[in-house]
Amino acid sequence: MTSSLQMGRSGPNRPGPILSVNDLIVQFPSKHRFRKGFQALNGVSLEIAPGETLGLVGESGSGKTTIGRAILGLAPVTSGSIQLEGREISQLKRRERRRLGKDLQVVFQDPYSSLNPSRTVGDTLSEPLLTLGVSPKEARARVSGLLGRVHLPTDAMDRLPREFSGGQRQRVAIARALALQPKVIVCDEPVSALDLSTQARVLDLFAEIQKDTGVAYLFISHDLDVVRHVSGRVAVLYRGNLVESGDAHLVTTEPNHPYTQRLLLASPVPDPDAQAARRMAWRRLSHESRAGLVN
């Protein structure tokens, strides 16, 4: 995985946060009356500055997608705070949440399931604009511009999602997220369903858009190699806890926490000898962890 552009900012001169998550706890109730609910997040805190990309990485079940869903109002917040530009958004009513869509958008993992298969791309991209009172003529002109922004031809407007490749459908999903000119986009595994060459092109597109618009990304992924190339900073989740965070290069090349070290060792490398050495080191570290030698 390589990408010619790197997204995000890091270092002491970062501006104040545009998105703040403080002591976030998310607990899902049990389906059984006498059983305790499942706590997916245990007091997680993180911040994203304007124009920054924060990579959020962890294995399946770590809680990373739950954070994104809580920010979007799709998962219940048990306690803690989520603020967008200083405004508390964790307990908004449905109507208030819809208004928030102008500033906060999402790109999901599966572009096909997130697009209505019976509606043309033009109809899908026009819908949020028409809801805001934009005239149909102006909406169509803006949609044409959005398609150009994500490097799709104008005639894509009159085609259905099934007529596009996976990478093209993800470009449509990105265009839809950009339609209202948001300040923050939650990207939930946005390239994991794509092949490696398409991943690189889509990641470059994310970087290009961020450079042009100044949008901030929360980039959720299970792949350390992906977040290394797209993020200014990285936060690592393990079983609902934030175990490590910091500069993307340092966290993804010289991690301190044993869990992050295991994630790094699990990432494939093209050299067979290096891959074999990584596999042995991963097994050793995993054995030590199970034996209780590391936390």
Image: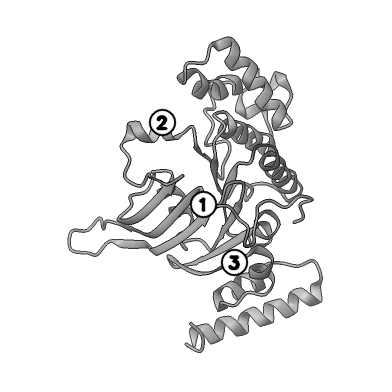
Residue 277 visible in the shown view:
yes
- Residue 165, given in percent of the width and then of the height, sits at 69, 35
Q: Residues within 10 Å of mark 3 (few under 14, many from 20)?
A: some
Q: Amino acid at mark 3?
A: Gly
Report the mark closest to the observer, 3 or 1: 1
Q: Earlier in the sequence, mark 2 or mark 3?
A: 2
Tell me residue 44's x, y (percent): 42, 62
- Residue plotted at (66% across, 38% down): 166
Percent of width and height locating residue 227 = 64, 58
Callout 1 amino acid:
Pro
Reading the image, the residue beneath label 1 is 17
Distance from disc 1 to disc 2, alpha carbons, whole Å, reads 21 Å
Q: How is the image coloured?
A: one colour
Looking at the image, residue 279 lies above or below residue 97: below
Describe the element under mark 3 as helix, strand or loop: strand
CA gap between label 2 and label 3 equals: 33 Å
Q: Secondary structure at mark 1?
A: loop
Comparing 72 with 232, the one in front is: 232
Residue 279 in the figure: left or right of residue 55 = right
Mark seen at residue 246: 3
Label drawn at residue 99: 2
Residue depicted at 26% across the width and 58% down the height: 30
Q: Find the distance from the CA under tag 3 to the CA under tag 1.
A: 15 Å
